[in-house]
């Protein structure tokens, strides 16, 4: 390992760590919205199954929840782009 570090240029190691950090940041930012969308859709389906007459209102609310949750993933993607060198 130390031999590998001795062969790299002065800034290559830090650029590599920055790329790994950016990839981890986007990956972790995508986990939260994925879990959130799963919870929103699962609860909406459960609510529609319990009261089918209110399915239209539940569906509209579900789509709003999905849109807000997906905005978190987009923010994570923007941070990923900004962290790139």
Image: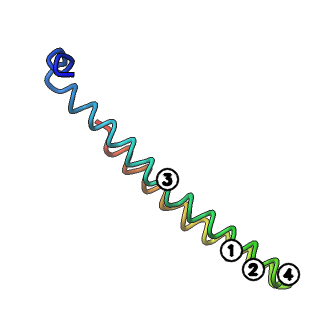
Q: Residue at x 49, y 53 (%)?
A: 30
Q: Which x, y percent locates residue 20?
A: 34, 37
Q: Is residue 62 left or right of residue 30?
A: right
SS class, disc 2 = helix
Residue on which the image places disc 3: 30
User: Dot 3: few (<14), some (14–19), or many (≥20) neighbours within 10 Å?
Assistant: some
SS class, disc 4 = helix
Q: Is residue 73 left or right of residue 42?
A: left
Does the residue at mark 3 contact the one at mark 4 (Cβ under 8 Å)? no
Among numbered discs 4 and 1, the one appearing first in the sequence: 1
Among numbered discs 3 and 4, the one appearing first in the sequence: 3
Among numbered discs 3 and 1, the one appearing first in the sequence: 3
What is the quadrant of residue 40 in the picture? Answer: bottom right
Label 4 or label 1, whichever lies nearer to me, is 1
SS class, disc 3 = helix
What is the CA distance from the residue labelled 4 to the residue labelled 1? 13 Å
Residue on which the image places disc 1: 43
What is the CA distance from the residue labelled 2 to the residue labelled 3? 26 Å
What is the CA distance from the residue labelled 3 to the residue labelled 4? 32 Å
What is the quadrant of residue 69 in the picture? Answer: bottom right
What is the quadrant of residue 66 in the picture? Answer: bottom right
What is the CA distance from the residue labelled 4 to the residue labelled 2? 8 Å
Does the residue at mark 2 contact the one at mark 1 (Cβ under 8 Å)? yes
Residue 77: give its label. Answer: none
Residue on which the image places disc 2: 47
Q: Residue furthest right?
A: 53
């Amino acid at each position: 390992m130390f031999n590998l570090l001795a062969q790299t240029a002065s800034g290559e190691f830090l650029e590599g760590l920055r790329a790994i950090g950016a990839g981890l940041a986007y990956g972790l930012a995508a986990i939260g919205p994925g879990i959130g969308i799963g919870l929103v859709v699962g609860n909406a389906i459960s609510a529609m199954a319990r009261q089918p007459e209110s399915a239209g209102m539940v569906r509209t609310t579900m789509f709003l929840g999905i849109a807000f949750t997906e905005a978190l993933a987009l923010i994570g993607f923007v941070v990923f782009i900004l962290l790139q060198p």
